[in-house]
Every structure is written in structure tokens, then in C-alpha cells.
Image: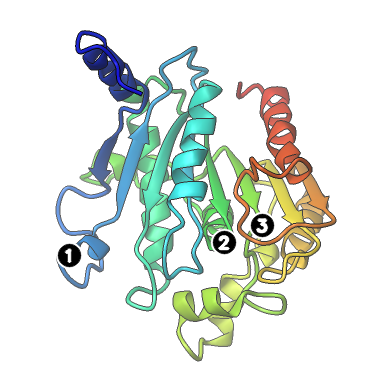
Amino acid sequence: MRYPIAIAPTIAACAAVLFAQEVRPLWPGAAPGALGDSDEDKPTLTIRLAKDNPKGSAVVVCPGGAYGMLAVDHEGRQIAEWLNARGVSAFILKYRLGPRYHHPVELGDAQRAIRTVRAGAAEFHISPDRIGIWGFSAGGHLASTAGTHFDNGNPNAADPIDRVSSRPDFMILSYPVITMGDYTHRGSRRNLLGENPDPKLIELLSNELHVTPQTPPTFLFHTTDDDAVPVENSINFYMALRKAGVPAEMHIYAHGRHGVGLAPLDPVLGTWGGLLERWLRRRGLL
């Protein structure tokens, strides 16, 4: 469709506002542990602030990809648009990947992302105690690691970002890898921990073993048919949350492949976003 010359710039300007974003490096210089100076060595946040009816909540989004790539479209950009449409600001995390990088680099990137959003709460017009993390597949492992391995920040740090807490206030885990032991996704484990990881490292990064009453409230979505990441990952994490008294809600669908994102074209799986929206609303985040 062609528009009159006078109208086209207006439409373009509106689109620019609607999809305005900023890509910001997590560190002003080289990231800790960087192995080079190429794009893959530079973790970033793509900032998509809610413009219409902002609710003051924010989410760090961790796309999946087996810790070897990032599914930035259906587990990144589309998620940011879904959040923005509901008044929630989104921060898409580009974290460093294996096999070039291994733990603890990825966790360090996620923790820095949460601290960056929290330290910039005034700039981003969000509340510092309404910052969540949403992860898909291996990104769900990273998100659940951030939710079970966090600290309160270092009050004596020279960098003000490092002075604030890395604990997310809530978690959304979509068909997540949770464990590095039984039921793990072996490609994710290999990329994160290497070919023959120390059993102690496997235990440390099996997040169902590290849930405490301080673990953030969590929403889980999975499918029984998932042939890449077994549904037991979500089930075992939910049971650990329940045992620790952490508020949690889990939805398991009978059928559906791995990596569906919001499943907008599936009339059954596509309902899970509505369940998540109601959960967020009940928690006062929308």
C-alpha cells in the first residue's frame, strides 16, 4: 500500500515511537571475563520502555537457545512487545554464550542486568521492587539461576550499580531448563559447563536444589510433550517452591512442542499468556 507523501512520514514517526528502543552495554568497558572485543563478547540490554499506561513494573527477558544462541525474535522481541502492551517495561538481555563462555559468566551477565535495571529505576520510571526476570528454555535456566543465586549487592562498591541487589522480585519460567542432573537438556549443560563438568558444579547449577523461602514468586509454563526439555524440570522446581512456601503457579499443557514462545497461532497453547497476565495482575504488577 502506498501512502500520500504528507502522510508517510507521520506513520513512520509513529512507528519509531512505538518501537523505540535503546541497546545499552552492561558494562561501560570490557565485561568481566571478556575473551575478546567482538559482538559476542559484549553483553547488552535492549531497553523497551512502556509508553502507554505504564504500571511501574519491569522484566529482564532471557531468550533461550541452549546457551549456544539466542532466539531473539519469538523469545525476545515478541515478549517485549507483549509486556509493553500491558504497561510493563522490557529489557532484553543479550548474554554471553557457550562454548566460548561458561559459568559463571552467564549468571554474572544476568545479575548485572537486574542490578542495572534496579539502579536505573528512576531513569526508567519503574519501581525498584517490581523487577522480574522471564526466561525461556536455557534462558529459563539462567533466570532460575538468578532467582536462586543472588546477593544484596556490595554497599562499598565503586560502581553504584554493584551496590544494589541482584534478586529478581518475581520469575516467569517458560519450558525452562532447571536441572543440570537427571532430566537436563544436555546441549544446554554442555554449552554452560563444558564436556565433563565437576559433579559439584552440576549440583550448584541444578536450581531445584537451591530454592529457599527467599526465592521469588514464580509462574511456570510447560508442555507434557516437550521432547527437548522434559516437563520434570518445571514439576520438580514447582515442588521445591511449594516445600519452601514460595508462592508459585504452574500450567502444564498436554500437547505442544518446545520453543513455542507465546504460541500466538495455537488456539490451545496460546491461552497461556492470558493465564500469565492474570497472575501478574493478581500480584499487583499490572
Where residue 211 appears, as percent x and y from the top left, is 68, 57
Tally of marks: 3
Q: Residue 36's x, y, as percent?
A: 17, 70
Q: Which mark is residue 141?
A: 2
**Residue sitting farthest toward the bottom:** 196
**Crowding near the residue tagged with mark 2, few <14, some 14–19, many ≥20 C-alpha atoms within 10 Å:** many
Q: Residues within 10 Å of mark 1 (few under 14, many from 20)?
A: few
Quarter of the image for the N terminus: give it: top left
Which residue appears at 41% of the width and 68% of the height? Answer: 104
Of mark 3 and mark 2, the one earlier in the sequence is: 2
Left or right? Give the position of 85 relative to 158: right
Q: Does residue 135 appear in this view?
A: yes
Q: Secondary structure at mark 3?
A: loop
Residue 38: numbered disc:
1
Where's residue 111, x and y in %?
41, 51
Res. 100 image quadrant: bottom left
Q: How far apart are labels 3 and 2 at the CA level?
A: 10 Å
Disc 2 is placed on an element classified as: helix
* Quarter of the figure with the C terminus: top right
Mark 3 vs mark 2: in front? 3
**Between residues 210 and 274, which one lies in front from this camera angle?**
274
The answer to which of marks 1 and 3 sits earlier in the sequence is: 1
**Residue at the image position 25 percent from the left and 11 percent from the top:** 4
Q: Quadrant of residue 175?
A: bottom right
What's the residue type where badge 3 is placed?
Tyr
Residue behind mark 3: 175
Disc number for residue 20: none
Q: Is residue 37 left or right of residue 260?
A: left
